[in-house]
Image: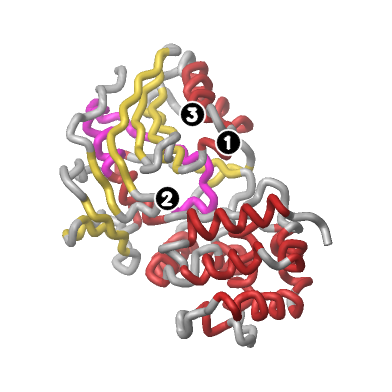
Amino acid sequence: MTDHTQLAETFRRFADQQATGLSPLYATLSRAIARTPDLLDLAARTQPGQPAPNMLLAAVHHILRRGVKHPLAPYFTGHEDLTEDRAADLLTDFCRRHAGRIQRIISTRSVQTNEVNRCTVLLPAFATLQQQLDDGRPIRIVDVGASAGLTLLWDRYTYDYNGHRLTLPDSDPDTVLHCEITDTMPPLALDPARFVRSVGIEPSPVDVTDREATKWLVSLTWPEQTKRMHTLNCALAVAARTPPTILAGTAQDHLADIVDQTPDDQHLVLVFSWSIYQIFGSPGGRERLVDTLAELSQRRPLYEISIGHFGHDTPRMIMASHDGGVSRSDVVAHCDVYGTWLDWLATPPARPSA
């Protein structure tokens, strides 16, 4: 067997730092994988740059969701609790039986989670920006790292903030996104009609009309997250009816052209939702992004909304303006990775340049 010491540590770290408390099943399975050479050999087939724990477990989930019968299945539906002593035996048997399918999945697919509930965090930022950009000009949103583009359809969802429903003219009543406001209520009033020609950028766009591709997106959710899975399915149904526009390629491929081709009478807003480090690397991704946008702002003013950890335990949202090579930014909120809570900071962001 190949020495997979570092890979085993990756699975243990995933169990302890990510899965514990959110997915007891994945925590148990990850610890089993970490001590089982045959499972580590299989996990090593994951594409370079992709997180092996997410990929292997999602592949197992994906196959089970297709109706495959196996003693492991009840644990993925929450009907039984998997014990540590049975986890390795059941998972090893399952992976042995379906090794070919698992290898094809983890060697060709990638983690492209599209957390639609993050729209609950983005909507207040859009409302704030609209208030600040009060000249009536249209606002164009570019989602960099768009995956399936579900956040581009933010105006098609229904919102629930602390039990109060917010509907927009095109809201789908079945796709309800929930968010708890922990303190100050953020701005929520906005005119969706002012937001025009939204577009995403994604190296490998997920085709929302491709059932196999969307089923993989759902399989990337963790088995215990049944509510999140339901919301994702509802949002994918909305997207299939009105597919978002996504440009295939990297940010470096498209940003300059978008800056040049967006009409001068439109404000241009770039959104990065946990995608900065994927695009600009880590550490220092945020700094490289600012440098890039400062350079592009020599051509026209740019506005930025970025969500991520940025070196902190608690995620935060940054709003920034870039104009003539000068950048200004403010942390406007703290939030949850899944957008389930939002702490809107009392101090408003600095007014962007005209």
The x, y position of residue 38, in whole percent, is: 76, 68
- Residue 213 is drawn in which quadrant? bottom right
196 on left or right of 200: left
- Counting every numbered tag in the picture gives 3
- Helix, strand or loop under label 1: helix
| Residue at 40% from the left image edge and 20% from the top image edge | 322
72, 12: nearer the viewer = 12
Disc 3/disc 2 C-alpha distance (Å): 21 Å
Label 3 sits on what residue type?
Answer: Arg
The x, y position of residue 1, in whole percent, is: 83, 62
Residues drawn in magenta: 124-152
Q: Quadrant of the C terminus?
A: top left
The x, y position of residue 256, in whole percent, is: 56, 25
171 on left or right of 295: left
Label 2 sits on what residue type?
Answer: Thr
Q: Which residue is mark 1?
A: 279
Display colour scheme: secondary structure
Q: Which residue is mark 2?
A: 151
Who comes first in sequence, dot 1 or dot 2?
A: 2
Label 3 close to label 2 by CB (< 8 Å)? no
**Front label number (3 vs 2):** 3
Q: Which residue is mark 3?
A: 286
Categorize mark 3 by other alpha carbons within 10 Å: few (<14), some (14-19), many (20+): some
Residue 112 lies in the magenta stretch: no
Disc 1/disc 2 C-alpha distance (Å): 18 Å
- Helix, strand or loop under label 2: helix
Who comes first in sequence, dot 1 or dot 3?
A: 1
207 on left or right of 311: right
